[in-house]
Image (cartoon, grey):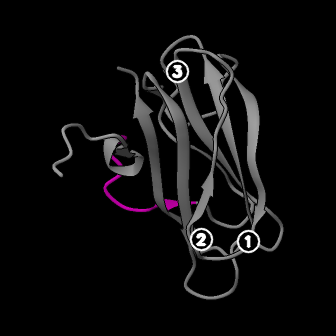
Amino acid sequence: MAVEKEWIQTIDLLEFLNASVALAVATTATVYTKSFVWPRGRNFGLQYRFAVDSGTPDVTVNIESGTVADISETASTDEYGVGNIIEANVADEVAHWKAPSPVVSPHVRFKLKGNGSNPATCTLAALKLCYTPED
């Protein structure tokens, strides 16, 4: 039986946000992605993966919400606030899947915080958002 409609949409957020290389989250750095408009849909899934040359990643992933596009582009700003911790202390290099639930707002971005033992070579190697679009 042929499928008439793609039921799950996937956005490669690193590609969508024009990150031509993996996003560095070195040691205890705090890194912000560019903001984007949250897609209209239901049933969201977020997939992310960190990579290091040696050692073990140690990163906390937050989602921030804002009412305007992020004019600071990847810096701390009063326009955005931490809505949810997606996962604290990611400590491996495998893909993680979470169901994000950002505060309702038109724009979101991710905040990545390297923790004490995070290696200097740590990068965000994958960041994808999957969702069921509204009809």
Q: Earlier in the sequence, mark 1 or mark 3?
A: 3
Region in magenta:
17-24
- Residue occupied by mark 1: 118
Identify the residue at image location x=39%, y=50%: 14
Residue found at the far top of this picture: 67
Residue found at the far right of this picture: 116
- Residue occupied by mark 2: 122
Tell me: residue 12, above or below residue 17: below
Instruction: Left or right? Give the position of 122 relative to 116.
Output: left
- Residue occupied by mark 3: 107
Tell me: residue 92, above or below residue 44: below
Residue 12, x across and y down, in percent: 36, 49
Other residues around mark 3 within 10 Å, as few (<14) / some (14–19) / many (≥20): many
Instruction: Left or right? Give the position of 9 relative to 47.
Output: left
Front one among 105 and 17: 105
* Residue type indicated by callout 1: Asn
Identify the residue at image location x=56%, y=68%: 95
Foreground mark, 2 or 3? 3
Helix, strand or loop status at disc 3? strand
Instruction: Left or right? Give the position of 100 relative to 46.
Output: right
Q: Specify the quadrant that holds the C terminus.
A: top left
Give me the C-alpha separation between circle 2 and circle 3. Answer: 26 Å
Front one among 111 and 85: 85
The answer to whether the residues at label 2 and label 1 have Cβ atoms under 8 Å apart is: yes
* Residue type indicated by callout 2: Cys
